[in-house]
Amino acid sequence: MEFDALQYTRDDDGIVVLTINRPDALNALNTAVMDDLDRAFRTARSDDAVRGVVLTGAGEKAFVAGADIAQFPDLDAVSGHRFAARGQAVFNRIEQMTKPVVAAVNGFALGGGCELAMACHLRVASEQAQFGQPEVNLGILPGYGGTQRLPRLVGHGIATELLLTGQRIGADRAHAIGLVNRVVAPDALLDEARALVGTIASKAPLAVAMALQALRASDQPLADGQRYEAALFGQACATDDFQEGVDAFLNRRSPEFSGA
Ligand code: COA
């Protein structure tokens, strides 16, 4: 798969590793990266051989150090609005993937980089990772969903502090507040992220997809979310993999899921 601004590799287990590849600019998100990200996730979504995605940044220093500030001087009210809406749409499509997407955060995840990590389903961080939403230092606010996803992940109070001070936090603090799921040594990062995708990929694929759909509805009123959950539960009960999973349990064997 050919991309200009990222590397796309798929291993024999069907796990795609997407590496944003602008290390000289700390993998800042310019138009080329955003276009490639969108195309890469569309490719991964439609390829039946793909079971999940690990997203990371090239080099040892950064996951993504934010949107490309070099592109900012040209923004005005109209183009700024368009810029944010486009980024939100790309990130929403990542979040809406029905296969697991794990961010392997290898260094700075600032601004749009933190927002990108939050659009992934799970986050594994290297001990060297640093997170933050420093947009207030530039006279803006996050525009790729950060003001919405950060409070959902870490709670309103801590999100308010991070968004208003622009402070950077390390991996341990990010773990303590629930921003990342796991913290590992830098050289264990990719293996850990791959293993996490592999674990999820070994489960019933439709059940995983439906759980992701239901989770996305968790910001709706409880009754609406529960109605949706019950409808999905009914759909899950109609799958072959439900029969297989229950039969395997009752007969004390490992299930062999077909994805149907
Ligand atoms: N956009 C464009 N270029 C960026 C960038 C960004 N968000 N972040 C880093 N870079 C570039 C730098 O301009 C520099 O390029 P150069 O070598 O051509 O001068 C290169 O990446 C290395 O960055 P540098 O600042 O020299 O590294 P550092 O170790 O001193 O500092 C950071 C690292 C991440 C603290 C610092 O680069 C930074 O604050 N970046 C901006 C973070 C930010 O505000 N993101 C939100 C944007 S909305």
Image: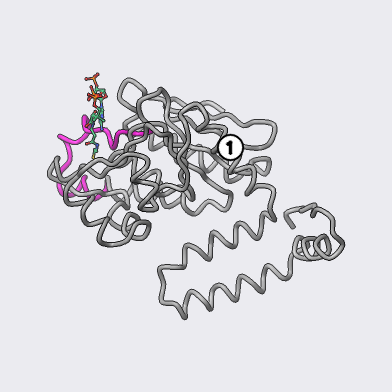
x and y percent of residue 143 in the render? 26, 49
Quadrant hosting residue 22 = top left
Q: Please report the bounds of the magenta region as a residue range.
A: 63-82
Identify the amino acid type marked 1: Arg
The residue nearer to you, when weighing 45 against 215, is: 215
Circle 1 — which element? helix
Q: Residue at x 64, y 46 (%)?
A: 199
Disc 1 packing (10 Å; few <14; some 14–19; many ≥20): many
Q: Position of residue 224 (x, y in %)?
A: 47, 78
Locate the N terminus by quadrant: top right
At 22% from the left edge and 57% from the top edge, which residue is drawn?
A: 160
Q: Position of residue 207 (x, y in %)?
A: 65, 60
Figure quadrant of the C terminus? bottom right
Using the image as rendered, state which of residue 20 and residue 40 is in the foreground. Answer: 20
Residue ID at (45%, 33%) = 56
Name the quadrant where ligand 1 sits: top left
Is 178 placed above or below 15 here?
A: below
State left or right for residue 226 relative to residue 88. Answer: right
Q: Position of residue 68 (x, y in %)?
A: 26, 33
Left or right of 106: which side holds 252?
Answer: right
The residue lying toward the viewer, choosing from 97 and 166, is 166
Residue receiving disc 1:
194
Tell which of 187 and 41 is nearer to you.
187
108 is higher (above) or lower (below) than 100: above
Left or right for 105, reference 108: right
Name the residue at 48% across, 37% down: 55
Q: Is residue 186 positioned above or below 98 on the image?
A: above
Magenta stretch prevailing secondary structure: helix
